[in-house]
């Protein structure tokens, strides 16, 4: 089908946005939480409402605000009042919204995905709240991507600054979310089941929106309600694999990991986890949108950590060329989370993994006729930027050539944001109030064959 460069770009964005909309908590929560007479149904569980004393809502994540609001709506005003519903959820500062009974706490600034003193204070409030619940109470925990940084509670003797530096060092080495959280769990009083151990409610139900390929519950927000045995040896192995630089922060972490393992208190609450959405949910919905626009699509959602942004980009470009040259699918939708190895901080520009991926794709293919590629973080936040990602199209490439901009130089410095800013290729959405990894869309016009 004949499609202009602008149409390919517009269609790619429309398909991407449809996928993101499908994983908004206001759509997902009602599918899993409902009140039916004297019963509260959550996933496959039913609770007898007259037997419940109080309900508390806690949690953290980039989707925390929208999850809390959707949960309040699902419970309804009558139940909120009857069960004295209260709560505390840590969220990014730019995600604050109006709620009925849950306090939303700005635990970190926008686009700074690191633990902060504000997050530490908010986590303390959450742990105090759940510790004061009783056996007749129900605790509902909302967890989504970004929860690890929003829910800091370093173990005794480990300064918060050391955890911040550790996060930066792992990111600079291109560490995966799994590697990062393997270490985080060993250094926290709340991660790795710490919230579950602190909770004194009779029942603890965690509603999870996954930003981890494969949906490993221990990795999503570092598993605050997933009881587990400490594994400092695994954390130590990750540090060695990444070759983290010697520093005061690294030494503090090493000391913490070599301390004797203290006995963990038992989890007294009956704990249940309910996965309400993930990357595959978004990719599937994007595929439906592609069909409505007249595309024949192919889809894939990664179930394990991806390779580097450059390697993922190379694969997408290869498939895009094949689709352009042969009959068959003319839209490719993929999801996952690649890694990026950062340039030295003295040379480093501004960007994120989606921006790096898009620029790598642009640099690796000269002819973008009848092709467009969009790569964006479903949370609307790609690295320390105000963009979700970027789009590459024939028009974007033409502007770069006219301006004589060297894409490879921007790539080398991780400065894709400024490259795409100059050629009108940024994708800006603001906070989407959800988070299920990244999604890429390739749209194809008529074949050149």
Image: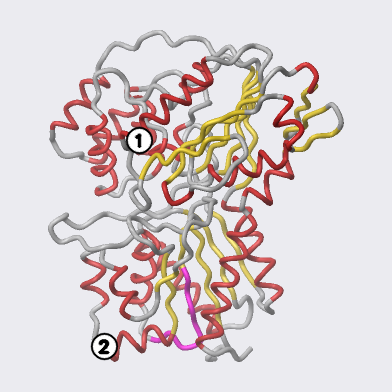
Q: Residue furthest right?
A: 37
Quarter where residue 352 is shown:
bottom left
| Residue 320 location (% of width, % of height) | 50, 76
Q: What residue is at 42 percent from the left and 65 percent from the top? A: 389
Tell me which segment is drawn in magenta.
367-374
Q: Is residue 74 above or below residue 315?
A: above
Residue 321 in view of the camera: yes
Q: Which residue is mark 1?
A: 118
Q: Residue at x 52, y 73 (%)?
A: 442
Local SS, label 1: helix
- Report the front residue among 36 and 296: 36
Q: Position of residue 284 (x, y in %)?
A: 65, 59
Q: Is residue 449 above or below residue 193?
A: below
Mark 2, Cα crowd under 10 Å, few <14 / some 14-19 / many 20+, is few
User: Is residue 265 positioned above or below 407 on the image?
Assistant: above
The tag earlier along the polypeptide, 2 or 1, is: 1
| Residue at the disc numbered 2 | 403
Residue 76 appears left or right of 123: right
- Image disc number at residue 230: none
**Any part of residue 213 in sight:** no
Q: Quadrant of the C terminus?
A: bottom right
Residue 30 sits inside the magenta stretch:
no
Q: Could you say which quadrant of the image residue 43 lies in?
A: top right
């Amino acid at each position: 089908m004949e499609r202009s460069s602008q149409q390919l770009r517009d269609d790619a964005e429309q398909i991407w946005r449809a996928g993101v909309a499908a994983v908004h908590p206001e759509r997902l929560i009602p599918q899993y939480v409902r009140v039916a007479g004297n019963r509260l149904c959550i996933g496959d569980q039913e609770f007898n409402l007259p037997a419940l004393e109080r309900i508390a809502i806690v949690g953290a994540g980039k989707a925390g605000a929208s999850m809390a609001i959707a949960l309040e709506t699902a419970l309804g005003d009558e139940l909120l009042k009857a069960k004295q519903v209260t709560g505390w959820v840590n969220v990014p500062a730019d995600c604050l919204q109006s709620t009925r009974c849950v306090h939303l706490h700005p635990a970190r600034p926008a686009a700074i995905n690191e633990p902060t003193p504000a997050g530490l204070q908010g986590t303390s409030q959450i742990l105090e709240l759940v510790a004061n619940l009783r056996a007749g109470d129900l605790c509902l925990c909302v967890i989504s991507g970004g929860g690890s940084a929003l829910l800091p509670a370093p173990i005794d003797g480990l300064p918060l600054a050391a955890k911040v530096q550790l996060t930066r060092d792992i990111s600079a080495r291109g560490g995966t979310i799994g590697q990062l959280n393997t270490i985080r769990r060993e250094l926290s009083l709340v991660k790795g089941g710490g919230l579950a151990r602190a909770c004194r409610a009779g029942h603890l139900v965690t509603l999870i929106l996954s930003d981890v390929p494969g949906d490993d519950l221990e990795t999503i927000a570092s598993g605050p309600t997933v009881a587990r045995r400490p594994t400092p040896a695994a954390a130590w192995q990750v540090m060695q694999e990444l070759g983290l630089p010697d520093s005061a922060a690294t030494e503090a972490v090493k000391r913490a990991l070599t301390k004797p393992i203290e006995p963990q208190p038992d989890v007294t609450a009956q704990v249940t986890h309910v996965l309400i959405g993930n990357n595959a949910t978004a990719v599937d919905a994007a595929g439906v949108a592609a069909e409505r626009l007249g595309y024949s699509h192919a889809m894939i959602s990664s179930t394990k950590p991806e390779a580097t942004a450059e390697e993922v980009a190379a694969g997408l470009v290869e498939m895009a060329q094949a689709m352009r040259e042969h009959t068959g699918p003319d839209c490719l939708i993929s999801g996952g989370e690649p890694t990026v190895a950062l340039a030295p901080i003295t040379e480093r520009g501004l960007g994120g993994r989606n921006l790096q991926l898009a620029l790598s794709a642009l640099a690796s293919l000269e002819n973008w006729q009848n092709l467009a590629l969009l790569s964006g973080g479903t949370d609307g936040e790609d690295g320390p930027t105000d963009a979700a990602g970027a789009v590459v199209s024939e028009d974007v490439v033409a502007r770069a050539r006219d301006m004589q901009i060297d894409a490879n130089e921007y790539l080398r410095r991780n400065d894709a944001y400024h490259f795409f800013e100059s050629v009108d290729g940024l994708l800006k959405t603001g906070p989407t109030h959800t988070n299920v990894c990244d999604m890429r869309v390739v749209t194809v016009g008529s074949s050149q064959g």
